Image: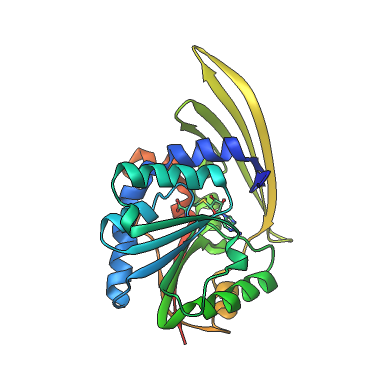
Amino acid sequence: MVNKIYGYDEDLWYNIIKSNYWTGDRDVDFIDMVLKRKGKFRHIIDLGCGVGRISNRLAARGYMITGIDLSRKCVEEAKKIAENLRLMNNIDYIVGDYRTLFFSKAEFDAAICILASAWKNLDEMKLFLKNLKDKIREGGILLLVDIVKEKLLISLFSSPSIQRWFNFNDDILSLHTWKYNLTTSMLKTEKEFYKKCGSKLNYIARVEREYPLYSINDYLKTISIEWNIEDIYDPPLNLMNLDSFNDPWWAFSLMIVARRI
Ligand SMILES: C[S@@+](CC[C@H](N)C(=O)[O-])C[C@H]1O[C@@H](n2cnc3c(N)ncnc32)[C@H](O)[C@@H]1O
């Protein structure tokens, strides 16, 4: 049982990511394209799968997926969607912490970790990458999508509206303020949440988080200790589509593709 996910109560977290499920249509083509470009991968582990936004869509394209997430509510929702879509033959969902993966050696062809980091510092990232290596077959790959300092800073400084924005997730309004401290390299996010009740907005929560931002170089140095870095992609984003502004994490992120040595 988890109490907090990235500082959120599980219920609020679940409601927010559930309402973002639709964005998977935009993102899965890119992920599938990279997987196909890199080889033949059948069994994929989705680390921090949330409500199955990507897992379910990859399963619908014929991959065998194991999705793991800390949040039972998210995993139950992912399963429910998969059952409705009759995908359960291709998917196995598990509640758990992917840092302590209990699978047997070299069980998977590939791992994806899409905006689901669980490390507080580079040493923890290093340990995660070392443990994961054991679970992926030789020649398998890791697709890691995460916020990187350079992209976030370009977005923050080139568009002041990104430092403060609002976001509607069904009936939940979030007000975001993101601040970056140049001297400590820490990002502070402050979010307030309101629930829509008729024409009123009722305050429900405030979530503050402060966490280090890693540069492309930090990622590359850490990943390349145990893996071969093959590509870095800028995930495609159609900024002419206003919904992209309501879900800007893709704009702050890069995808690093690394091969299991
Ligand atoms: C922003 S969501 C992204 C979900 C999914 N990858 C997607 O793209 O839709 C991040 C998810 O990672 C999960 N998560 C974070 N740390 C985790 C850990 N150590 N083990 C398992 N899941 C984790 C959270 O519970 C959350 O549901």
> Could one spot residue 18 in this view of the protein?
yes
Q: Can you give x and y, in whole percent of width and height, for residue 153 in the image?
A: 56, 57
Residue furthest to the bottom: 261
Residue furthest to the right: 184
> Could one spot residue 181 in this view of the protein?
no
Position of 186 with respect to 67 (left or right) is right
Q: Can you give x and y, in whole percent of width and height, for residue 205 in the image?
A: 66, 31
Position of 62 with respect to 81 (left or right) is left
In the rendered view, how is the structure colored? rainbow
Q: Can you give x and y, in whole percent of width and height, for residue 91 in the image?
A: 37, 57
Residue appearing at x 60%, y 19% in the figure: 202
Position of 146 with respect to 27 (left or right) is right
The residue lying toward the viewer, choosing from 212 and 149, is 212
Question: Image height check: is 203 above or below 250?
Answer: above
Residue furthest to the top: 199
Residue appearing at x 52%, y 20% in the figure: 196
Residue appearing at x 68%, y 56% in the figure: 211
Indicate the quadrant of ligand 1 in the picture.
bottom right
Q: Can you give x and y, in whole percent of width and height, for residue 25 in the image?
A: 31, 48
